[in-house]
Image (cartoon, coloured by chain):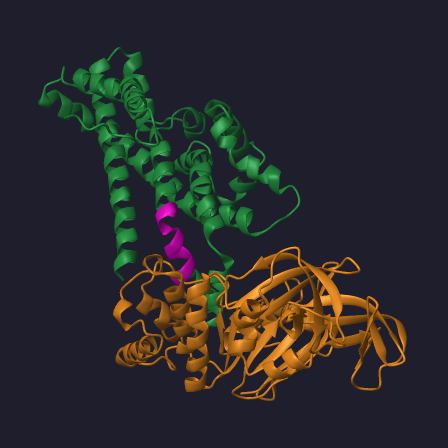
Chain colours: A green, B orange
């Protein structure tokens, strides 16, 4: 005899169907196609492409600049989120809205404006140059662009968690004799660490694949400021589709590994908190 | 240790939370700050703790002026209404926190911390739950963890903000009896805030009744309940019937019935208030020469230890009378019946003067 199952949330089958279809069309099938295309190369050829000096240099610059940008966003994003949650000040709504701007702005526009600002004749660049700091057309420029586009990820993941953090908890820590630093380190940071890590991971993933805003400010000097996504573009322009996909596959693996690592770390922090 | 509060005033923008409040808590006392919301009781508690800074006035603990001392140096145990436990720490770590954050020179050894935390957890009867997280505990258990955590730093004084406010009625009752016993055991000077008059009268050695940023009366539960100094206190401590009256020749009018105002000293007044508690009114079948007024029964509620009777007086006011179950059965009351109500005890306040 069939037992009829009742649930108060109807439409599970339909909703799951939509989810699978959507993910397949947008994510799984393109990635599968990418992998398939890469198989047109033999292992030897694949290895040769991805270990060539120019490609390795581009991976290094992409990876390190993204890491630096994500780390910087971790600190700056925390400060911005903290200010937006804890204090009230005039035009707070506007400042809050500004955080989303990097999401909305076409990345090329961001890239061109940043280049203008930071180039040697630019408003900021001309002031930094006498100090011996070059931003545009150096790896530092790449970090600036990647920090710009990654900021909203950290702020927006932290905000709800900080709002949820009762100020009474900090008052409790102070009444128990903790100084400000101890309250932050032992009470506030552990409560928000999982969200902070998630935000940093998202910022990193976004930065690693970023193209539009970087190509203007980086100067694209092979071996020095050429990022991996740009190299893919270059290969495509030379009709070297196999070579382009080979680089893409490596980028995919790196992104996936980093996301996996951060997720494991988040899980470990949560569990570590649950164990201590 | 004693607590003295001198001429404390505190405003939040245009709102005056406390006006010139002066209070003294003798060492070892368990004192209740009682009042409606917005009366300033929590603000006063937070000022004593150092969580809030007064606009003017002083706070002294054990004779020492601590008004400008930062919170973390005051060694004050503070228990928050919503517990404010550290949710990423176990029960044990929560209680140990105050000891762990001490400067190295004053910090007890690991073994000592362990021993002290376990002793406290035994005191609050949670030694079985040391490795649980706050989210795995019931409300009553969380509140006991918060208390153990506050006691771990060996506070000079213990302050509790609506400690049972977020708990259900049954746990509340258990926990307040337990708090009373705990206080008798450890004897640290304690102040707790509540808006529940029953809680204040049952638990505290002394009760401070606050209203609109001022102290209305300070006294033992018995004193404030039986000899309320102001109409507000009378009104706030338990159910009460209010009669608008006037006083002539030492007698007060309840409708057309004259009641003898017992003590002299109350002057004649056009406007007086007579307060009578529901259980201090009697219901009779006949007037029989007593001082009594007529009333019609509107509603009877016999559920509970006392029978609650709602009546409409001959001059049209609604009043509440509480009778014992015995008396209710003897009288055999029914809805819509006309009966006589006589006061056993009452309190008259004429203008600002009371008898």
Q: Quadrant of residue B57?
A: bottom right
Where residue A257 appears, x then y in whole percent? 23, 37
**Badge count:** 0
Which quarter of the rendered picture does the C terminus of chain B lie within?
A: bottom right
Residue B168 sits above or below residue A136 on the image:
below
Q: Position of residue A231 (x, y in %)?
A: 30, 23
Quadrant in which residue A185 is drawn: bottom left
Find the magenta span and give its range. Answer: A186-196
Residue B304 against residue A153 in the figure, above or below: below
- Any magenta on residue B69? no
Residues A99 and A211: in front is A99
Q: Nearer the viewer, residue B58 or B44?
A: B44
**Which percent across, then down, holds residue A117?**
55, 32
Left of B240 or right of it: where is B244?
Answer: right
Residue A153 against residue B350 in the figure, above or below = above
Residue that appears at 33% across and 81% down: B108
* Residue A112 left/right relative to B341: left
- Is residue A193 in the magenta section? yes
For residue B292, say whether it is visible: yes
């Amino acid at each position: 005899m069939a037992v009829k199952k009742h649930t108060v949330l109807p439409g599970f089958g339909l909703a799951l169907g939509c989810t699978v279809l959507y993910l397949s069309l947008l994510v799984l099938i393109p990635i599968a196609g990418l992998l398939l295309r890469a198989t047109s190369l033999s292992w030897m050829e694949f290895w040769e492409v991805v270990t060539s000096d120019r490609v390795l240099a581009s991976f290094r610059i992409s990876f390190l600049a993204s890491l630096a940008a994500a780390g910087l966003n971790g600190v700056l994003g925390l400060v911005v989120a903290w200010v937006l949650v804890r204090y009230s000040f005039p035009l707070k709504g506007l400042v809050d809205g500004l955080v989303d701007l990097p999401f909305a702005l076409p990345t090329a526009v961001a890239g061109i404006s940043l280049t203008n600002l930071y180039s040697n004749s630019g408003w900021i660049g001309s002031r930094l140059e006498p100090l011996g700091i070059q931003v545009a057309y150096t790896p530092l420029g790449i970090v600036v662009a990647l920090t710009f586009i990654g900021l909203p990820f950290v702020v927006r993941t932290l905000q709800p968690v900080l709002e949820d953090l009762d100020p009474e908890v900090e008052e409790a820590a102070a009444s128990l004799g903790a100084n400000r630093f101890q309250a932050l380190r032992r009470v506030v940071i552990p409560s928000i660490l999982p969200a902070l890590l998630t935000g940093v991971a998202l910022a990193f993933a976004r930065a690693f694949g970023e193209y539009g805003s970087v190509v203007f400010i980086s100067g694209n000097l092979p071996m020095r400021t050429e990022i991996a996504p740009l190299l893919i573009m270059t290969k495509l322009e030379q009709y070297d589709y196999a070579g382009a996909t080979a680089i893409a596959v490596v980028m995919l693996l790196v992104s996936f590994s980093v996301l996996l690592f951060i997720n494991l770390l988040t899980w470990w922090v949560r569990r570590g908190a649950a164990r201590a | 240790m004693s607590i003295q509060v001198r001429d404390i005033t505190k405003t939040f923008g245009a709102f005056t939370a406390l006006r010139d409040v002066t209070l003294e808590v003798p060492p070892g006392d368990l004192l209740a700050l009682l009042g409606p919301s917005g009366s300033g009781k929590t603000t006063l508690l937070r000022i004593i703790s150092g969580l809030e800074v007064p606009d003017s006035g002083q706070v002294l603990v054990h004779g020492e002026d601590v008004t400008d001392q930062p919170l973390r140096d005051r060694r004050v145990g503070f228990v928050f209404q919503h517990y404010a436990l550290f949710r990423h720490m176990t029960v044990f770590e929560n209680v140990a926190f105050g000891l762990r954050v001490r400067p190295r020179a004053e910090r007890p050894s690991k073994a000592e911390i362990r021993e002290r935390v376990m002793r406290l957890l035994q005191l609050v009867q949670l030694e079985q739950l040391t490795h649980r997280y706050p989210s795995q505990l019931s409300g009553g258990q969380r509140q006991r963890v918060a208390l153990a955590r506050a006691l771990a730093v060996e506070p000079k004084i213990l302050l509790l903000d609506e400690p049972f406010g977020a708990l259900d009625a049954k746990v509340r009752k258990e926990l307040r009896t337990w708090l009373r016993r705990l206080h008798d055991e450890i004897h640290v000077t304690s102040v707790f805030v509540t808006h529940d008059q029953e809680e204040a009268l049952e638990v505290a050695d002394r009760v401070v009744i606050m209203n609109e940023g001022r102290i209305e009366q300070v006294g033992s539960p018995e004193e404030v309940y039986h000899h309320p100094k102001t109409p507000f206190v009378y009104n706030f401590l338990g159910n009460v019937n209010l009669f608008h009256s006037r006083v002539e020749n030492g007698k007060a009018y309840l409708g057309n019935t004259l009641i003898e105002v017992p003590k002299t000293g109350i002057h004649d007044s056009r406007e007086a208030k007579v307060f009578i508690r529901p259980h201090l009114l009697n219901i009779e079948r006949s007037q029989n020469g007593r001082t009594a007024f007529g009333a019609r029964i509107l509603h009877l509620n016999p559920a509970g230890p006392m029978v609650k009777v709602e009546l409409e007086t001959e001059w049209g006011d609604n009043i509440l009378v509480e009778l014992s179950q015995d008396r209710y059965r003897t009288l055999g009351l029914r809805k819509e019946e006309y009966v006589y109500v006589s006061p056993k005890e009452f309190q008259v306040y004429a203008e600002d003067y009371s008898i």
